[in-house]
Image (cartoon, rainbow, N blue to C red):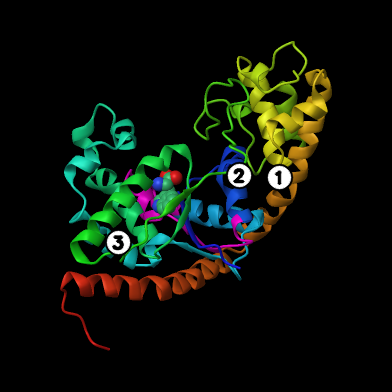
Amino acid sequence: MSKGRVFSGVQPTGNLHLGNYLGAIKNWVGLQQDHETIYCIVDLHAITVPQQPQLLKKATQEVAACLIASGIDTNNSILFNQSQVSQHAELAWLFNCVARLGWLNRMTQFKEKAGKNRENATVGLYAYPTLMAADILAYKATHVPVGDDQKQHLELTRDIATAFNSMFGEEFFPLPEPVIQKTAARIMSLRDGSSKMSKSDDSDFTRINLNDEDDLIAQKIKKAKTDPEPLPETVEELENRPEARNLVGIYAALTNQSDAEVLVEFSGQGFGKFKPILAESLIGSISPIRTEMNKLLADTNHLDNVLSEGSKRAAVIAEPILRACKNVMGFVQSTS
Ligand code: TRP
């Protein structure tokens, strides 16, 4: 039984890591069970900052391979890249004429990404959230799994939907809800528990990449920063121990438990005991993904076909919604 239509997007960036997997992908896989799921590799969002064409293509294929290897079932879920479904860009333009400068001026991600040199940012980077609203509303999606950093953009999507509805017809667009993850897996650097695990950190030992070999994973966990105390009994006692908390959080997310449940099992134990078990669990999750990913990436034609099939299925849903949208806005359209 479907509990609604899920839409989410991921940027085509190379070097996917554990943070991407536990923070988003694993959640996407789980949602397939009882929702209609549409997952989009957002290449049009990627070009809001300069991209090298060859690398963009490679990153798109890598993300597709990673999602499939992680358990996105393309017989059920729709998996595609954004630029192949032109309805996204077209609806984004319509929304550019609904959203207000004042709304976009509040977006903290633009301020962060544009930095001091705002005059030099692309218009696309500024309008990024209206494209994201189009992604979601082109399917009248009801549920949107997003991380904390995207909540403001989802709020804006709701504002656009509300404004559109009041201008052109009540209840045209449903207001999409954020999907909050059960295990709030915010995965931090293995060397600094206060900064997010990131593909751009200089040191490779701060992160577990999804293509790391088993030995390397074990080595990285062994060298991960910790403190000398054994694991405590309560989650509160982890508060001022960011590195310990991160490792507990990783294990919890991998094994579908809460941090508290992990502590029930490991309280009183030192990291000498905990780390090898964590490493084993990581290898158990990542190793099959890595193997499958490499297999898929050996045949990029096949991957490209999967994405274009997904794009066709996506367009079948988005096309009539865009058409109805244009109709209520007063555009003359072909009648066929
Ligand atoms: N902006 C999102 C990110 O950077 C990606 C994204 C694009 C998205 N369109 C979306 C997420 C629609 C959810 C729904 O993570």
Is mark 2 in CB contact (under 8 Å) with mark 3?
A: no
Question: According to the image, label 3 marks what residue?
Answer: 89
Indicate the secondary structure of the residue bearing disc 2: helix
Residues at marks 1 and 3, CA–CA distance in whole angstroms = 35 Å
Locate the N terminus and report the quarter of the image it occupies: bottom right
Check mark 1 vs ligand 1: CB closer than 8 Å? yes or no. no
Task: Name the spot of residue 49 as percent of width and height, x first.
Answer: 33, 43
Check disc 1: other Cα within 10 Å, few if <14, some if 14-19, many if 20+: many
Q: Nearer the viewer, residue 112 or 298?
A: 112
Left or right: residue 169 versus residue 68 is left
Task: Name the spot of residue 178 as percent of width and height, x first.
Answer: 46, 48
Task: Name the spot of residue 266 as percent of width and height, x first.
Answer: 81, 25
Q: Which mark is residue 21?
A: 2
Q: Is residue 62 visible?
A: yes
Question: According to the image, label 1 marks what residue?
Answer: 286
Question: Looking at numbered disc 2 in the image, what kind of residue is underneath it?
Answer: Tyr
Question: Looking at numbered disc 1 in the image, what kind of residue is underneath it?
Answer: Ile
Work out whether mark 2 precedes mark 3 in sequence or the reverse, and give the earlier one. Answer: 2
Indicate the secondary structure of the residue bearing disc 1: helix
Q: Nearer the viewer, residue 148 or 182?
A: 182
Left or right: residue 141 versus residue 1 is left
Question: Looking at numbered disc 3 in the image, what kind of residue is underneath it?
Answer: Ala
Task: Name the spot of residue 319 as percent of width and height, x first.
Answer: 35, 74
Is mark 1 in CB contact (under 8 Å) with mark 2?
A: yes
Residue range corresponding to the magenta coloring: 31-56
Residues at marks 2 and 3, CA–CA distance in whole angstroms = 28 Å
Left or right: residue 237 versus residue 48 is right
Indicate the secondary structure of the residue bearing disc 3: helix
Locate the C terminus and report the quarter of the image it occupies: bottom left
The quadrant where residue 261 appears? top right
The residue positioned farthest toward the front in the image shown = 170
